[in-house]
Amino acid sequence: MTATLDGRTGTAVDSVVAEAEELRRPRRRRLLVLAGLGAVVVLLAWASAPRWGVRIPSELGLRIGGEARVLTLPEFGVRGSYVLDYVDGADVAIDVPMHNDGVLGMTVTGVQLSEEPRPLLELVGVDRNVHVPAGGQALLSLRARLTNCAYYHEREVARYVSATVTYEVLGRQATRVVPLEHDLVVHAPMIVGCPNGKLDRSLLNRR
Amino acid sequence: MRVHQVRAAAVAAVAVLVVAVPASAHQERESQFPAGVGRTPAYRPFAEATPRIVVCKPDSGNRVASIAEPAARAFNERLLDECRFEHIQAAVDAVEARGTNIYVLPGLYREEPSQAPPCTKDYDGGIVDYDLIVSCGEVVNLITVAGDDPADADIVCDSARCDLQIEGTGQRPDDVTVRGGFDGAGDWIKHNGIKADRADGFYLRNMAFELFRENAIYVHETDGYALDRVVGRHNELYGILTFTSDHGLIKDCDTSFNGDSGVYPGSAADVNRDSTSAVPPISRWAVEVTGCNTHHNALGFSGTAGNSVYFHNNRVHHNAAGYVTDSFVGGHPGMPQDHARLEANRIYANNVNYFVEFVHSGICDRKPGERGHGNGTVCPVFPVPVGTGVLIAGGNYNLLRDNDIYDNWRNGVMQFWIPGAIRGDYEPGAQLGTSNGNRYVGNRMGRHPAGAVQPNGLDFWWDDQGVGNCWEENSSATGAVTHNALVPLLPDCETGSLVPVGNVKDATLLPCSEYNREDNPDPVGCDWLDSPAEPAGRQAAPDDDAQDAAVAGVTAQAPPQPARAPSRLPATGSPAWVFGAGTALAALALGLRVRRRRRAVA
């Protein structure tokens, strides 16, 4: 509807103003609704930022060093293997290059290799709060220890196939399980290499 | 040029060495091969058996009186008069001269003085070094024969207990039974029945050993031994275990219901390690195993680093897997495994699924004394592909010739590669150093000797890896031998296989290696513990198989277990419902706005 203000009669002007008011009210309501929806969208976007805002690699390559020997065997097993030599009490340094191809930066707050009790390779230290910028990369440094052999049969293998990465984006925390590029394999040692090992294998139930 | 040197380049290797690993062994002290200058002892008949010591139980007289055969009864009655000892260990301790003969009269020997003597009180359950074996072998053994003087540095037998012969005098091995069993708390009384440790010339004959935490009969670091007409049964691990020993003979044995294997010559002396041929000239054998019946064990035979084993004219049947040799487990001198020869054996019906029957059912979680050991219970400590006749998990220059291999429902023979790092050998050249030069010649696959067709699930399973492996003149009851090689025909021995690097057929090895009976009894991604289906066209056999199955006392075949897919945990930070709800709300808002605009326009 179009109103014409020609000044001929007050009644006509009032009528036009009233009509304009009529028009403004729903527009305000619409604006309010839109603002509300916008707030909801922003809230949802914030809540889901860890998912859409960052892009973690589909698998993590490891650089393993420290006091134990390791070989990378890409041909052994379905996805290849990092084979780590068990030396009781030895420290293992694991560097994990972390790329982020997303549009938001992320802060890695934790990494886990296993939730099993008494792992043969136990993480004892993880760099906290490593920032990985949007489109950039950073190096996570994990410190692990070879331990708990007394809880493993001497013919048993411990295999770590993924890392659970905990990270923060815009203050939102998230966790993602990321497969390792190759399985990380540790063979339990014989009793000679296991200072607390017992011949009766009484500790094999780790739970 | 050595093959593995060429192949090393194919392996991507990043090695970091800082800490050296001690030379370790089977669940044992550090061990080494004897010098190998000894000889396999010959049996000494009674006429040559001096000096001699006789052992008997209070009821041996009654048992002797019940012997039906007059000559055998008379022989035992004569020995009964000479009996001065009630316990075998006491007789061993009384030996004063090399070449002594101990005769053990019919009876049940529990060896009570050895069960918990005062010297065992402080034992912490860990490694037992040789000094402790000499001073208090009872910490793990019911009967100990220790031949070396611990004061010297060598491992050579140099005491009165060298060339010791121990013989049961019953008509059958069962007539003289040494039993461990369980204590009042339901735990095993002893780890080993009898252990011959650095006891060169040891000869054990015509006796049965049963119910031990580890092994019934154990020979360790010994140069020259014979185990003749012995029985080893119902043990947590092995019926017969020999380790880092040489010049051995195991003949006419019967081993059954053991949680690892019936016969295990592990780390047999590596006397042919420099030979690159599976056929003569082979210098000699480390151990000969013949005339044995090994059945109803988790593994009929096994040998980590089972080198230069001559295994012939044996029956291997109704185990979870038949003959297994490997280079998988570290800490075994003589790696990688090489030069076993299997000839004229019957290897069949190795399909018994003890994993389902006793492990997955929870029976093996009970105290040892409550599981039913002695009544058919077997609690496997090691994962094997149930239904496999022969498994060579990383071995070289082995020869399988003229064997009958049939009715193994998964695979007749299985061979795959094991890289060195898995067993602790991190040299790049060792990574492709197994599964080379193995020969399979003239074996009869899938047919019972009486003629019935009893196919294997697959005659030959091979991961296509290795150089110089070959298959020739093998026959199959169902036509051509069946196999899974990528090439239509298995390589013959004219050329042998040519590909050093394997493929991913061995995908289940690593998941299965996570097996832990107590903690992870059914690993995700491992199908080895599932019962294989009966092959089509299987015919009933006319003779001993039904009897063999009846002896088992267990369900021969359990229903197949459903395969399980690996679990992958979803991301938890942004749950799917947040995203879904957000999308739905946005769509709702957009729809509302469009509808209002349309109404306003109208």
Image (spheres, coloured by chain):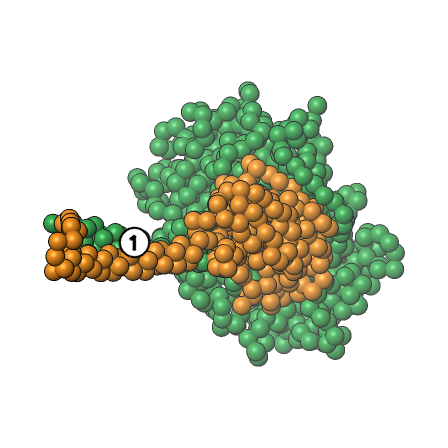
Question: Where residue B548 appears, x then y in whole percent?
Answer: 42, 53
Q: Colour of chain A?
A: orange
In the displayed orientation, state which residue is furthest to the right: B152
Residue drawn at 53 percent across, 49 percent down:
A105
Question: Where residue B114 appears, x then y in whole percent?
Answer: 69, 72
Q: Identity of the amino acid at label 1?
A: Ala
B533 sits left or right of B437 in the view: left
A135 sits left or right of A51 in the view: right
Residue drawn at 74 percent across, 75 percent down:
B122
Number of numbered labels in the structure image: 1
Query: Looking at the rendering, which quadrant does residue A45 occupy?
Result: bottom left
A33 sits left or right of B100 in the view: left
Q: Residues within 10 Å of mark 1 (few under 14, many from 20)?
A: some
Q: Chain of mark 1?
A: B
Nearest the viewer among B487 and A90 is A90
Question: Where residue B459 appears, x then y in whole percent?
Answer: 43, 36
Q: Is residue B36 visible?
A: yes
Q: Colour of chain B?
A: green
Q: Is residue B392 above or below residue B367?
A: above
Q: Which residue is mark 1?
A: B586
Nearest the viewer among B287 and A59 is A59
Q: Is residue A35 above or below residue B481?
A: below
